[in-house]
Each structure stands twice: as structure tokens, then as C-alpha cells.
Image (cartoon, rainbow, N blue to C red):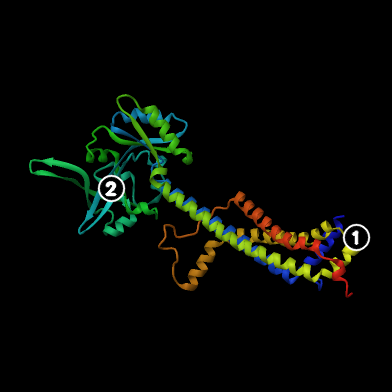
């Protein structure tokens, strides 16, 4: 019963002259393959960019910050307790102050951040991105590490001295004025992210002196494995630490940088929907191909109906033709998409060689990262197939309405 639709569906898919495929089928396959491959390439690159952004920013900013209504004393015992928590990867004291960095006639607002340099390798990716000097230099003297963008803006390099003015007020017999300190640049990092413009690192001990914390700290920084549950973990930690004498509040990266990542995800969603319009266009080409086939094969359909072929058999002929176009187009699209994804950097390099200019210098990364998501590709293939099949069914069902007496009346 199925042999007739399969044979005829394959026959209509092929060229009348005995070629592998007809011209119209080839055009439809090419359109669908291009649509699917472009969708895979763009989505894989956007996945890579999102992951790179996540690694660069969330690899440095605190996942969780535990703060209190007053300075946190005996923070070492609190950190030891947190280190026993299975949800916590590592914990360390943390102080962050708003300040102004000045050098000669240039100034820039910064976030002066005191860290535990001994734990920073476990806490963040920052040590991997030091391009000059070292993070360990913060352990001796009044040293400071800043971003390459900020260093370029201020016109400073290793060994230069910056004047840091904080919001802390110093009072003396001549009046009140902001606290200032001269710090020597001992390291420069480059994340190629917005943090390069404002994040300035000092040792936790130096931050305690600047902020008059003495033996206390401002907050406790916590790194967790499950970033999506960071706020829940922060609330749980704060609740466990709170007492009648001192209460704690937990915040996560979602409050400081959540908007940025939501914007990236929204952009990714909109881009996906727009790119699926290309698949819809390719589906219309398949629809046109099947319509032309139905129109050109009306005489054969009339004969088949006359000799007893059922409507479902006739519909199946053109559904099989459309399904063959869809499957081959999607398979080619996946192959081309995967090849294009892994070679996207080579393509950009080729375009740059033609234009004689670097297209990515102004961005936070100077290459195209990619992350191939198998489940995402499966969804792309499934939705593309369903859209193509839907486009095939519309003209295929019209076959059942054809009247053989009208078609064959002049034969």
C-alpha cells in the first residue's frame, strides 16, 4: 500500500531527465540547508559569547556577598564554617569602596576592592589575566593592581604612583576632608570586559586600614558552583549567621549583573525568532515546489484516481516528496552549520584580510567563541522539519479535491 506513494514521491523528487534531483527540489533543498546552517552558526556563536561573558564577568565578581549591619568581627571563624558548607566552593573576606583614582591631570571613578590574595586563585579567574606584574605583589607595600583600560586612560604603567581618594572622611583640627592615599601600581590585568574600567584591586589588609576596619571586614565573598541558585544560597547563609546581636544579608550576582545577562538572553531569543523567519521562507519555497509538482502531475493524479487510488495514497505521494526535500535540506544544513561554526574565525580572518582592518579590536574579545549545543540543534532540526512538513501538507491535501472527470475530459 505504501509502495506506490514512496515510488511516485521519489520519482517526482527526481529530475524528469533522470538526474538525482529536479531543479525545483534542488532550489528548495539549498534554501532550507542555508537557513538551518545559518541558524546553527549564529546560535552556536551566541552561546559561545554568552559563556565567554559569563566566564569573564562572573569569574571575577562575587557570586555571593554576605554583609551585615555592622563590621564583621571574627570573620575567620565564619569563613571556616562556610568552607564546610557543601554548597560553598570557597569563602574569603571582602571590602569594596567607591574611590577616585588620579594621576597628574586625569581622574576616574573606581571600585577599590580589598581581597584575600592567597585565596584569589580559587575565588576568581583574575590571576590568569594578569598581563604585567603579579597579583602576589599586593602582599607587600602599598601596591595596587588595575585594569589595562584604566591604565591606558590614566597613562600609567608598572611602578607609577596613583592617588586614591576614598569616600571615607578624615577629621582633624583643620577640618574634615576625604581620605587620600598614594598607591604604587604593581600589576595590570586585562579581562576585555567593563570591569577593566573600574575594578581596582588591593590587599584585604590595606583595605582594612583605608576603611578603618582594623580587625574586622566589610563583607564575606563566597564562590559557589551552582550560579543559578546563588541568591537562594546567599539567603540561607545569611539566615544561619544572623543572631539577635547582629543580622546578615545575602546578595548575589543576579542583583549586580543579572540585568546584563537577562539582556543577553533576550537578545538571543529575538535573534533566534528572526532567524527562524529564514526557515519559514525556505518552507514557502518547498510549498511552491510541491504546488508546481501537483499542478504538473494533475493528469497522472486523475488517472490514479480513475483506477482506484485512494486520497490518502495520493496525499502521501506529495508528502513524501516534501519530506525528502526537508530531510536532505536539514541534514545538509546541519553539516554546513557545524563546519561553518568551527571555521568562523577563519572566515572572519579572510574578511579582515580583504578589508585590511581588524573587525574585533573594539570588542571585549577579539575572536568568535562558539559553543555547540546538541539539544539546541535537535530543536532547530525538529522545528524546521515540522514547518517544512506543514508547508508540504497544504498543497498535498488539495490533491483530494481534484475531479478526475474534469482533468481527463479532453484526453
- Residue farthest bottom in this picture: 410
Foreground residue among 114 and 253: 253
Q: Is residue 20 visible?
A: no
**What element does badge 2 sit on?**
strand
Tell me: residue 264, above or below residue 171.
Answer: below
Tag 1 residue: 308
Q: Where is residue 140 drawn, in percent x and y?
A: 27, 42
Tell me: residue 196, above or below residue 73.
Answer: below
Tag 2 residue: 144
Residue located at (86% from left, 59% from top): 4
Would you say 354 lies left or right of 5 here? left
Viewport quadrant of the C terminus: bottom right
**What element does badge 1 sit on?**
loop
Q: Residues within 10 Å of mark 2 (few under 14, many from 20)?
A: many
- Residue farthest left in this picture: 173
Q: Where is residue 168 drawn, in percent x and y?
A: 21, 42
Is label 1 or label 2 in front? 1
Q: Where is residue 305 drawn, in percent x and y?
A: 87, 63
Tell me: residue 309, above or below residue 227.
Answer: below
Label total for image: 2
Residue located at (47% from left, 60% from top): 367
Foreground residue among 257 and 47: 257
Question: CA gap, disc 1 to disc 2?
Answer: 89 Å
Residue located at (34% from left, 31% from top): 248
Dividing the picture into quarters, in which one does residue 365 lie?
bottom left
Q: Is residue 120 visible?
A: yes
Q: Earlier in the sequence, mark 1 or mark 2?
A: 2
Viewport quadrant of the N terminus: bottom right
Q: Residues within 10 Å of mark 1 (few under 14, many from 20)?
A: few
Q: Where is residue 272 drawn, in percent x and y?
A: 55, 57
- Residue farthest right in this picture: 307
Amino acid at each position: 500500500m505504501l509502495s506506490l506513494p514512496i515510488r511516485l514521491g521519489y520519482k517526482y523528487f527526481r529530475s524528469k531527465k533522470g538526474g538525482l534531483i529536479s531543479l525545483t527540489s534542488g532550489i528548495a533543498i539549498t534554501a532550507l540547508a542555508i537557513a538551518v546552517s545559518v541558524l546553527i552558526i549564529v546560535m552556536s556563536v551566541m552561546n559561545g559569547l554568552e559563556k565567554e561573558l559569563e566566564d569573564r564577568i562572573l569569574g571575577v565578581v562575587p557570586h555571593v556577598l554576605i554583609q551585615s549591619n555592622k563590621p564583621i568581627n571574627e570573620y575567620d571563624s565564619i569563613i571556616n564554617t562556610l568552607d564546610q558548607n557543601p554548597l560553598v566552593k570557597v569563602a574569603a573576606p571582602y571590602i569594596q569602596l567607591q574611590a577616585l583614582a588620579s594621576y597628574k591631570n586625569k581622574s576616574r571613578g573606581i571600585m577599590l576592592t580589598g581581597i584575600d590574595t592567597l585565596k584569589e586563585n580559587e575565588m576568581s579567574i583574575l590571576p590568569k589575566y594578569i598581563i604585567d606584574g603579579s597579583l602576589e605583589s599586593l602582599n607587600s607595600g602599598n601596591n595596587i593592581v588595575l585594569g589595562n583600560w584604566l591604565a591606558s586612560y590614566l597613562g600609567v604603567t608598572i611602578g607609577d604612583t596613583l592617588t586614591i581618594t576614598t569616600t571615607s572622611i578624615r577629621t582633624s583640627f583643620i577640618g574634615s576632608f576625604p581620605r587620600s592615599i598614594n598607591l604604587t601600581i604593581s600589576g595590570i590585568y586585562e579581562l576585555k570586559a567593563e570591569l577593566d574600567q573600574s575594578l581596582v584591586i588591593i590587599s584585604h589588609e590595606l583595605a582594612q586600614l583605608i576603611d578603618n576596619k582594623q580587625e574586622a571586614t566589610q563583607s564575606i565573598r563566597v564562590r559557589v558552583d551552582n550560579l543559578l541558585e546563588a541568591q537562594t544560597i546567599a539567603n540561607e547563609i545569611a539566615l544561619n549567621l544572623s543572631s539577635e546581636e547582629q543580622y546578615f544579608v545575602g546578595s548575589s550576582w543576579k542583583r549586580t549583573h543579572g540585568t546584563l545577562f537577562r539582556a543577553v538572553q533576550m537578545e538571543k531569543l529575538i535573534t533566534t525568532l528572526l532567524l527562524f523567519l529564514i526557515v519559514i521562507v525556505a518552507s514557502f519555497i518547498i510549498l511552491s515546489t510541491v504546488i508546481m509538482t501537483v499542478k504538473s502531475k494533475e493528469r497522472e493524479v486523475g488517472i490514479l484516481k480513475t483506477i482506484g487510488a485512494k486520497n490518502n495514497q495520493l496525499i502521501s505521494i506529495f508528502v513524501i516528496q516534501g519530506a525528502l526535500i526537508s530531510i536532505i535540506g536539514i541534514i545538509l544544513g546541519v553539516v554546513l552549520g557545524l563546519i561553518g561554526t568551527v571555521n568562523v574565525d577563519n572566515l572572519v580572518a579572510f574578511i579582515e584580510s580583504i578589508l585590511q582592518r581588524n573587525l574585533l579590536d573594539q570588542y571585549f574579545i577579539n575572536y568568535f567563541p562558539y559553543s555547540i549545543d546538541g539539544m539546541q540543534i535537535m530543536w532547530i532540526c525538529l522545528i524546521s522539519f515540522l514547518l517544512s512538513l506543514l508547508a508540504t501538507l497544504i498543497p498535498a491535501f488539495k490533491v483530494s479535491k481534484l475531479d478526475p472527470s474534469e482533468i481527463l475530459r479532453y484526453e
